[in-house]
Image (cartoon, rainbow, N blue to C red):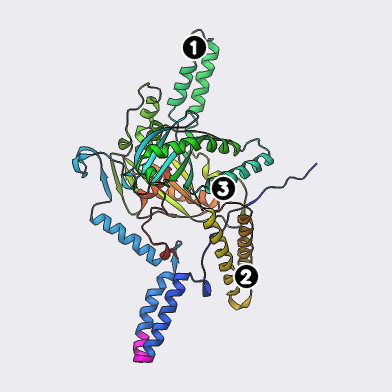
Amino acid sequence: MSEYVERTYSAGTRPRAEGLFGLSAVAMLTAGVVIVVVILGQAMFGFKVAGILAGVGVTVTAPLVVQIGGRTGYVRALLLWQWWGGVRRKEHSYRSGSFSAIPGGATVLPGLLAPSRLYRGQAVDGHNFGMIHLPKFGEYTIVLRAWPQGGEAVDQDLVDQWVAAWGAFLASLGSAPDVKAIVPVIDTVPETGNRLTAEVAAMMRPGVPEVAERVMWELADQLASQRVQLEPRLAITFEATTPERRKIPAEQALEIGRRLPGILAALAEAGVRAEPMTPEQIIAFVRRSYDPASQADLEAAATDPDGHRLTWAMAGPADEQQRYDRLLHAGAVSITWEMTAAPPGVVTDRVLQRLLEPNPELPRKRIALVYRPHSAAEATGIVDDDWRNARVAQQNTKGGLVSASASIRVANAEQARQEQARGHGLTRYGILITLTAPRGADIPRIEALVRDLSTQARLTIRRCNTYHSAAFAASLGVGVILPEHATIPEALEG
C-alpha cells in the first residue's frame, strides 16, 4: 500500500529589477541623480542651497520608494488625477439611446468596449464562432464555452495530468507570437429555472409514462432550487500580425478558423471540453452581466427560433456611472478587485477552489484569470535578468547575512532559467474578482466576504478604485486587457 502524497506547485515569482537596498531601478536612478545634484549644489552654492535641494530630492524620490497597496505614490496620484479629470469632463457617466450624449443618439458599449465590433466566423470543422475586434489595438478575441472536469472522485494522478496538459496548452499558445492573452472566466449567476424547464420540455415526447414525466419535472425543480449556476468560459485574444488582418477582419477569421480545432483538442487533453460561442451567445452573457434583470428574458429567448434579436451595440447597459469605489449600471452595483500578490510559497491544485465555487451569499460572482504569455525571445531575456537581479538582491542583504527569502528567490530564478531552456513557456498572470449586487446592497458585507475568500485562496487583492468600468470589462473576457490597454507608465509602477 503506497502512501498518499499531496502534490504541490509553485505560484511563480514576479521578476523585478532591484538595486541597492532593494530599491527599484527607477527609484535608484532618481536617488542617484538627487545625490549628485545635492553634492554639486553644496560645492557651488553652499550648505543652505544643498539643504533645499536635498529636501526637494526627498520629496521627489519618496513616492517612488514608499508603496501603498502595491502601488507607488506617483501611480496613485496619476490614477486619482485621471479620475478627477474624467469627472470634470463628465466622462464617468454613460447613457445610451436617444438621451445619450453620443452624436445622433447612437447606442454603443461603454468605456473601452465602445469601439469594439463583433463578427461571425466559421472554423474548418464547421463550428461557428463570434470574434470581437478592437480596431485601435488590432486585436481579435474569441470566446469558448467550457465544461471543465470537476475534482470529485478523481485520482491525483489524473489531476496531475490535467495540470501538466494545461501548462502545455499555455506554453503552446505562448509560442505563437500573435497570442496576447488567455482568459479563463468562472461566472456564477442566480438560477432562474428557465433553462432546466426548457431542457425538460424539449425531452418530453407524446406517450411518455406519467411516472417518468413526473420524476423529470421534480428533478428540474430540485436542481433549480440550488439557486446558483456555474458558467465557465475561455477567451483567447489574438493580435493581427499582418496589415491585411488588421484592416480586414475576414482574413483574421480565416486564420483563427484554421487553428481552432487544434485549440479545442489541446483543451480536451487538459480535462476541459469546450466549443466556440456564437455571436448571439456572446451578446447574451455580456448583456446579462451589464443588465442582470435581463437574464430571465435572455434564457427564455434561447429557445426562440429567432433568438434574442439583440445586436452587439445593444449588449451594454442603458446607463452606467463610474464612481471612485464602485460601478453603477442598470439598477445594479459592481465592484472589482485585482490580485496584487500571488500565493506565497507552494500551493495545491485546490488553492482557488473556495474562491471559484458557487457561493449562495454571492450569487453574481465572476473570477477571471488573465494569462499573458511571453514570446520565446522575451522569456529568455526576462529569466536571465531576473536571475541577475536576484543575485544582486542576495548580495545586498542587510548586515551581510543572506536571508532565506533571498536564497529562495535565487533558487526559483535559477529553476526558471533551466525550465525555459528546456522549452517551457513563461507567462504573466493575474486575477480579477467582480461582484455584482442589486443597488443598495450591503457593500461592507460583500467586501468582507470577498476578502475572506481571497485569504482562503492565499491571494492579496486590492479594489480597482478609479477604474471600475475598465476592470469590469476586463473581467468579462471579451478582449479588454488592463496591462496592455493601461495609461499608467510601467516605469512608475516601481
**239 and 100: which is toward the camera:** 239
Q: Does residue 231 sit above or below 306 in this rendering?
A: below
* Mark-to-mark CA distance, 1 and 3: 48 Å
Q: Residues within 10 Å of mark 3 (few under 14, many from 20)?
A: many
* 362 is within the stretch colored magenta: no
* 48 is within the stretch colored magenta: yes
Q: Mark 1 — residue?
A: 205
Q: Amino acid at mark 2?
A: Ser
Q: Mark 3 — residue?
A: 171
Which secondary structure is most common in the magenta stretch? helix
Q: Does residue 167 sit above or below 215 in this rendering?
A: below
Name the quadrant containing residue 63: bottom left
**20 and 353: which is toward the camera:** 20
Q: Secondary structure at mark 2?
A: loop
Q: Residues within 10 Å of mark 1 (few under 14, many from 20)?
A: few
Q: Are marks 1 and 3 in contact (CB under 8 Å)?
A: no
Q: Residues within 10 Å of mark 2 (few under 14, many from 20)?
A: few
Residue drawn at the location 80% of the way across and 41% of the way down? 1
Q: Give the mark nearer the N terminus: 2 vs 3.
A: 3
Q: Secondary structure at mark 1?
A: loop
Q: Mark 2 — residue?
A: 403
Q: Is residue 149 left or right of residue 103?
A: right
Whether residue 442 is visible, yes or no, is no
Name the quadrant containing residue 58: bottom left
* Mark-to-mark CA distance, 1 and 2: 71 Å
**Magenta range:** 43-51
